[in-house]
Image (tube, grey):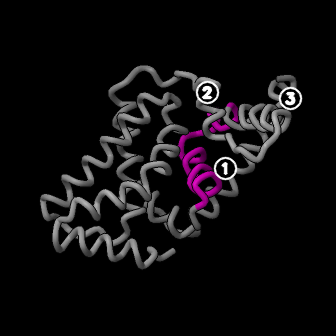
Amino acid sequence: MKAPWHEKILLLRLYEDRSADAFGQLYDIYVQPVYRFILFKVRTSNVAEDLTAEVFLKTWEYIQRRERKIDNFRAFIYRLARNSVVDHYRKSVQADVVKSQEELAFIAESPELSIASIVEKNSDLATIENALRLLKDEYREVLILRYIEDYPVADVAKIMDKSRGAIRVTLHRALQALRQEVHAPENLNK
């Protein structure tokens, strides 16, 4: 997926003028998706906010050092987010902190839904989230990028530094593993 023309213009302004305004606009475009991506991996909003801020700070510093130009800003920012999460877990022993119901509601919230459908959706979301936690990290990451963040396979491949074919195979295996976890007898009774 190619970057939209307005994003290309912002990147050009960013490199030519070191425009803080252009970086701010890119930040506005990507802050929520990057935050959501990190939140699904760390499961606490405070840590997700800190890591998201760190990702954008590192990106700004990278650009200011006049290192190589970023060809695909989306892939760059998600790879940096992914690496920040890995670094966080290397430093932290709190890998099993559980998300609060408020965070789940934040992700699933929609003003068009009735109370009953929100409760049902939160219940389904909790089941899927629990099943996602049981998957290996690579499967969880590919499912989040493809189906929650809604990125095409080509972008997921760039973010995860794999071929498109490898991503398709990983997606297939991840979906099978997710189905098994969701339909496992211990999960059906919840």
Q: Quadrant of residue 83?
A: top left
Vertical position of residue 112 compared to residue 70: above or below:
above
Residue drawn at x 74%, y 33% is: 122
Query: Which percent across, then down, holds residue 13?
Result: 24, 72
Q: Are marks 1 and 3 in contact (CB under 8 Å)?
A: no
Q: Quadrant of residue 180?
A: top right
Spatial CA span between label 1 and label 3: 19 Å
The residue beneath circle 1 is 174
Residue 176 shown left or right of residue 87 in the figure: right
Query: Which percent across, then down, holds residue 38?
Result: 47, 41
Per the rendered image, the range of residues in magenta is 130-150
Spatial CA span between label 1 and label 2: 27 Å
The residue beneath circle 2 is 102
Which of the two discs, 1 and 3, sits closer to the camera? Answer: 3
Observer-nearest of 29 and 97:
29
Mark closer to the chain start, 3 or 2: 2
The residue beneath circle 3 is 188
**Label 3 crowd bin: few (<14), some (14–19), many (20+), radius 10 Å:** few
Observer-nearest of 19 and 149:
19
Residue drawn at x 55%, y 39% is: 40
Instruction: Identify the element where label 1 is drawn.
Output: helix
Residue drawn at x 47%, y 76% is: 2
Is residue 116 located in the magenta-colored stretch of the structure? no
